[in-house]
Image: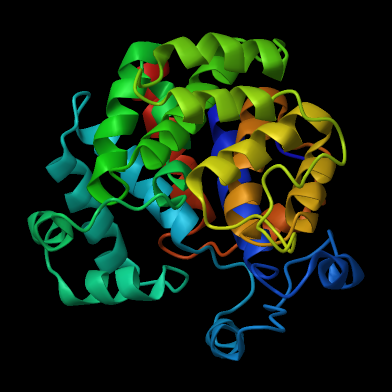
Amino acid sequence: MKEYSPLEWMFLGIVIGDTFGSAYEFSGNREFIKEHLDINQYDDHLSTINPKKLQLFQTTPKGIYTDDTQMSIGVAKTLLKTRQPSQSDFANEFVEEFKKNPIQGYARGFQQLLEEITSGDELLERLYKRNGSIKNGAAMRSLPLGVLSTPKQVAYVAKTQASITHNSMEGIISSQTIGLLSWFLRKHPLVDILTTVGILQTYMDKKGVDQKNYVKEAATLKKGDISFFLDEKLTGVPCDGMKTAAAVIYILNNYQTATEVLRESVLLGGDTDSVASLALGLHGLRSGLDDLPLALIETLDNGPQGREYLLDIARQLEKTYLK
């Protein structure tokens, strides 16, 4: 397999986890996923509970990423333009990237909003007083923040970008958790997750006491302790910022290879693409993805905004922030 830098591995992890996981997202139950999962290739969307979503994804070719990757690209490209980004900077990139490549996979209301507007300022205006979501949209795009210089800066910028769409303590802390994990694992890849989380909590928003305690408890979970972050019916990880962050921490703490990380992220069920994208991105940053089936890299879409586009962004971030 070709050699990649840690940041290139991270971006490959983001897009592979997102693309692979999207086939199984909210597809019924965890036993159904286990029966159909094939780690060697991208699959069609296997929804048993959402026929409309099944119909949508059947029109999308295999190997195409969704909103998790596109929003991460938006964050990364914002950082390439400025080291002190504002809400407007992020919003403009989110809209510009979508207009350039109007992919499927966003929440229905947000996708419609992106289709209707023409600028980041319009996005901010339309979301004003409607941006208190506790879901995981802010966290899912936070991995590129790990290139910033200090954990204090990561936490500040994570809060800035989270507050555009998820201006709740859950949205902010989950974004800070993922961004700070990216920063710390880039710097200290051999430190265990429990120690890592304990250190990073000191940089998170002081108001989020309950949320920070939840993250800390997630770092103590052993294999099988998944009810902690599953939905009430135990069918999978919901679109919840804190539960998604907890699931990612659980995966990183209990599985050692890239193949295990990808498989076990998806087998959790629910929002499989978000968990897999974040967990595999962080694992790639820390350890690489050498043991993944090569087909998962080779069969990624490589159009104008495909695989090489992502790798080029990773290289630009390295040159701008890490050289």
What's the residue at 42%, 68% (across, down)? 106
What's the residue at 25%, 68% (across, down)? 99
| Of the pair 55 and 204, the residue shown nearer to us | 204
Q: From the top left corner, tell me how far across and down residue 134 is, in percent.
A: 41, 49
* Relative to 220, 242 lies left or right: left
What's the residue at 53%, 41% (across, down)? 242
Q: How many marks?
A: 0
Q: Is residue 303 above or below residue 151?
A: below
Q: From the top left corner, tell me how far across and down residue 282 is, in percent.
A: 62, 32
| Residue at the extreme right of the image, as rendered | 35
What is the quadrant of residue 35 in the picture? Answer: bottom right
Q: From the top left corner, tell me how far across and down residue 207 is, in percent.
A: 34, 23
What is the quadrant of residue 138 in the picture? Answer: top left
Q: Is residue 232 above or below residue 258?
A: below
Q: How is the image coloured?
A: rainbow
Q: Is residue 314 visible?
A: yes
* Quadrant assignment for the C terminus: top left
Q: From the top left corner, tell me how far across and down residue 199 is, in percent.
A: 55, 9
What is the quadrant of residue 25 in the picture? Answer: bottom right
Q: Is residue 3 visible?
A: no
What's the residue at 82%, 31% (across, down)? 254
| Of the pair 213 and 146, the residue shown nearer to us | 213
* Quadrant assignment for the N terminus: top right
| Of the pair 298 and 144, the residue shown nearer to us | 144
* Relative to 116, 317 lies left or right: right
